[in-house]
Amino acid sequence: MVATLRVVLDQVVAPTEPQIAEASLELARALVIGAPSGCEVEAIAPAGGVDGALDAVPGLAGVRRTALQRRELAAALQLGVGTGIGGGMIHSPSLFAPLVRHDRVHDHDQTVVTVWDLRPWEAPSELPRAVVAWHKAMLKRAVKHADAVVVPTHSQAARLVEIAPALRDRVRVIAGSSPLGFAVPVDEVGRRRSLDVPEGFVLLAGGPLGSEDLDAGLAAVAASGVDLPVVVIDVDEGHEPAVADLASAAGVPERALHVRGVLSAEDRAAVFGAAVAFVAPSRRAAFPWRIVDALTLGVPVIAASSAVHDEVVFDGGPLIPAADTAELSEGLGAALASGLGSTAAAERLAVLSGDRGRSFSWREAADKVWALHAEL
């Protein structure tokens, strides 16, 4: 008898959150590669979306499309009405799943969902009200019906239990990773030229929202005295002027600033390939995807101390505690100046970063997902 793990890949065919879309794709690939003997992986996807998107996950046993497109399906899931998805072993890389009453003991139905970011609960004003309402409603449904809820760090697990105490015994920790085979591409120089990105710069990621603390990161670069260009990636379309305003207020010269949006994995790796350091000022309870990218490629990481960063970075680079934005900027700036103050110092941080980067793997994450469903 074949055991089928059905993975929800809504973000792969109809992406609305780039980081979750990439995580969904990479986890699905790793689940197929690491499927135990007698097991297979099937995709669940909404109607419509990008044609051929699931071709990026070779080896799927099948694809079950719903009658509803993603937007309508999201509303149906929120209300708990029929979606046609059915039962079986269901794993979702987000909260997007049929969280309804099911019988795990007799019918062997399981539903596992994932929470990567606690912004809807910790900084709801930064998101559209409908988005916040959907996430909160889906978490309530998870409390009632999920067999397990996956989070990427132990600190987020503890915080999630504070938000939803009834989940205590069902929370599991499985970290994310950079894409399988994530490496600086051989055509890195050409890619950076196409992106109009310089060679040798300090890299940051994020936008102007308060929980990103980008203002503190930019002020840190300015205060460090490091005379290098500054590149900011993952800036949502339309937010470029706000980022430029933050940079100007922080003292970063206009000529030194390069703002880019969400990049493909290959372009992103090419950008990291020319970064002399990655500065991570955000202290939000979210999995720090770009920190993991930096660690994977051995780029020196200078990060704000937070429950999540302390766990993810660990001994992979300096972690700066701070009580407020001004103290954070000063601490990050001093660490950046020290880390880039000599070739030996920069090389030491690169080694620490690369060593820590080997702790993250989608193959390992997939093994833990298979083990979780076997446990259930």
Image (cartoon, rainbow, N blue to C red):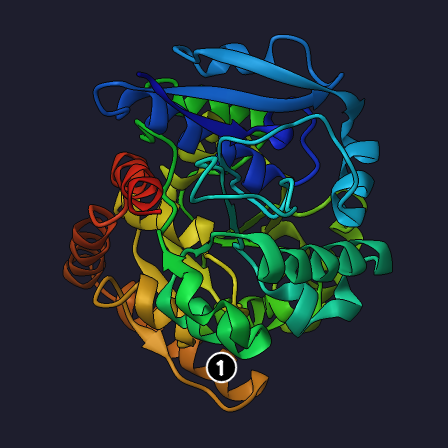
- Please tell me which residue is depicted at 61% across the width and 37% down the height of the picture: 18
Q: Position of residue 292 (x, y in %)?
A: 36, 50
Where residue 127 sits, quadrant-wise, is bottom right
Q: Position of residue 101 (x, y in %)?
A: 63, 47
Q: Is residue 222 visible?
A: no
- Please tell me which residue is depicted at 77% across the width and 51% down the height of the picture: 239
- Please tell me which residue is depicted at 66% across the width and 47% down the height of the picture: 235
Q: Amino acid at mark 1?
A: Leu
Looking at the image, is 231 positioned above or below residue 47? below
Tally of numbered discs: 1
Looking at the image, is 202 positioned above or below residue 334? above
Question: Which residue occupies the foreground of this view, 326 or 116?
Answer: 116
Residue at disc 1, secondary structure: helix
Where residue 214 sits, quadrant-wise, is bottom right
Q: For the residue carrying disc 1, how many other residues have a C-alpha within 10 Å: few (<14), some (14-19), or many (20+)?
A: many
Question: Which residue occupies the foreground of this view, 115 or 259?
Answer: 115
Looking at the image, is 162 positioned above or below residue 275? below
Image side of residue 35 versus residue 8, left or right: left
Which residue is situated farthest in the front direction here?
Answer: 106
Q: Position of residue 296 (x, y in %)?
A: 29, 44
Image side of residue 292 versus residue 212, left or right: left
Image side of residue 333 versus residue 143, left or right: left
Which residue is situated farthest in the bottom direction here?
Answer: 323
Question: Which residue occupies the foreground of this view, 74 or 272?
Answer: 74
Q: Position of residue 285 (x, y in %)?
A: 52, 68
Disc 1 target residue: 328
Q: Is residue 252 visible?
A: yes
